[in-house]
Amino acid sequence: MTSSTHLGFEPLINDSLLCAAQAHSSRFGVLGHPIPSQLGNDDLTTITLLLCFVAIATSIAFAREFISRQLRNFFYEVHSEELNNVTSNELRFEILLVVIDCMLLGIASYIAASEKIPGIFVRDTVFTNIIILSALFVGYFLCKWLMHFVVDPVFFGGKKTIQLFKVQLFITACSTTLTLPLVMLLVFFDLSVEKCIFYFCSVLILNKILTFYKCWFIFFRQKGFFLQTFLYFCALEITPLLAFSGVWLMTVNNLKINF
């Protein structure tokens, strides 16, 4: 028996070895389940939603006459140039609401991707991922409207092309007022993603129905070509939407790490 044992140092030696082993193993850690992100506790996201709410409320207050005029003439034929008579301030109001809509959709799609797509995001900053997803929606609207400006003047002329663009811009701007409550419920009241998807699909279907009606009304009503309207709508509205869905899913997979 060694002298250290006689002196009673054996328990101290064992404790030292145990502490050293624990310190060595703590360097590597143990892989666990990631904690889901709570956007309601994120200050930057909260400030962004607050600014979006203030911007939407202010814009609607200043442009209520424009909104009332557009809604009043939406389903009726206007013989004057009233629909095309949009001031620069009203145009800026619509563009601002479209940008806000892209930001809100980016937040909603981030929450859906966090809960429904396996893996964790590579970037730790939540707002960075939201900005990337929001930029995808901005790119979607820009590409879709660019396609309209390339194709529509060839068949229908520039005047009707601009008229349809302003109608689409107005429909998208109005959709922002329906998207904001959805995102608020998602972030602050833990609305389930399934209900969120159902609500979003309802808004999207309403958006496309109104767009289809205006495409027929502006381009094909006098000619009576319903089938051509359907083909045109599928080519320039449904196809870009399906392509965007694939790009969004591919982007989310690249932003995530799958274990």
Image (cartoon, rainbow, N blue to C red):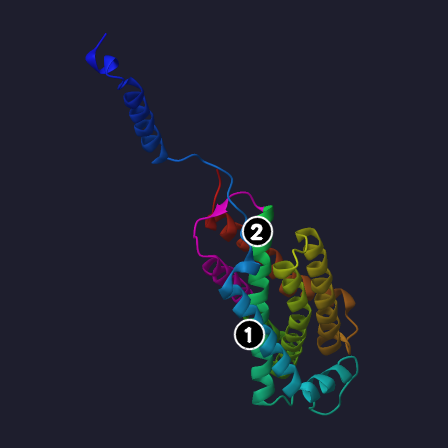
Task: Point out residue 17 in the picture as x, y percentages from the top left corner.
Answer: 30, 24
Q: Which of pointers 1 and 2 lies earlier in the amino acid sequence?
A: 1
Q: In the image, what residue type sits under mark 1?
A: Leu
Picture mark count: 2
In the rendered image, the residue lying farthest to the bottom is 80
6 or 259, nearer to the observer: 6
Magenta-colored stretch includes residue 131: yes
Q: Residue at x 58, y 66 (%)?
A: 104
Pick whichever, 130 or 41, lies toward us.
41
Amino acid carrying mark 2 in the image = Ala
On the question of residue 175 being in view, the answer is yes
Measure the alpha-carbon separation of dots 1 and 2.
24 Å
Q: Secondary structure at mark 1?
A: helix
Q: Nearer the viewer, residue 179 or 227?
A: 179
> Which residues, given as a range, are shown in magenta?
117-140
- At which x and y percent is residue 130? 51, 60
